[in-house]
Amino acid sequence: MPDYAGQNRWDANDALYVTGWGGFLPVWLHRPITADNDLQDLNAGPVNLLTVMVVEQKINFVSIHFSAAVNQTVTITQEFAFGAAWDTVLVNIPLINATDFVWYPDNDIIIAPNDSIRVQCTNAGLPAVNAGTTISMETFV
């Protein structure tokens, strides 16, 4: 970002401040992060990755890579701190002969502090494969 004659500045938290109305005005703060990763042997059990948010975050994508083609079902659920009655299934997709799954939300999904995202993948037992799961998020403070 250009520094227009030294008028704009970044603070230690990567927030951009611009001059205006007699002082510095914070414009935004965000940092892309990978919130959670997991490697699961599907012979040992299904994927069940739970990520609890500490700060408000937006889901960028969820991906699973399988070491061989699988016929499984992937479910991604937003779980609310209020209890299971509030939980929302965001996506439930059957995979047929797939080695990769990637889900990008159609709209911004903001997860509040103390709420969570759960990524699950069924375990049919065959073939013997590993599943590497990634949840990528963007943090807003």
Image (cartoon, rainbow, N blue to C red):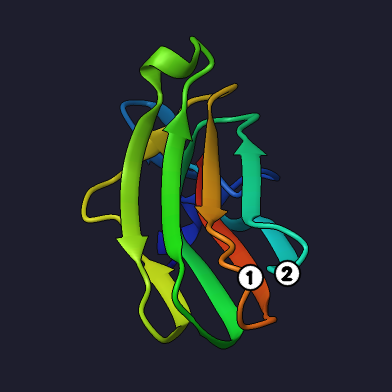
Using a 10 Å C-alpha cutoff, classify the residue at mark 2 as few (fewer than 14 neighbours), some (14 to 19) or many (20 or more). some
Give above or below for 61 relative to 116. below
Residue 25 figure quarter: top left
Q: Tell me what residue is drawn at x 43 percent, y 34 percent.
A: 78
Residue 7 seen in this snapshot: yes
Q: Front-most of 7 and 139?
A: 139
Q: In which quarter of the image is the N terminus?
A: bottom left
Q: Front-most of 109 and 98?
A: 98
Circles 1 and 2 in contact, beta carbons < 8 Å: yes
Residue 68, x across and y down, in percent: 59, 89
Residue 34, x across and y down, in percent: 62, 59
In the image, 17: left or right of 90? right
Residue 58, x across and y down, in percent: 43, 44
Where disc 2 sits, the SS reads loop
Q: Mark 1 or mark 2: which comes first in sequence?
A: 2
Question: Where does label 1 land, which residue?
Answer: 125
Residue 18 figure quarter: top left
Question: Where does label 2 land, which residue?
Answer: 43
Where disc 1 sits, the SS reads loop
Q: Tell me what residue is drawn at x 59 percent, y 30 percent.
A: 55
**Residue 17 disc label:** none
Q: Quadrant of the C terminus?
A: top right
Q: What residue type is labelled 2?
A: Asn
Q: Tell me what residue is drawn at x 40 percent, y 62 percent.
A: 4
Residue farthest to the top?
82
Give above or below for 12 relative to 103. above
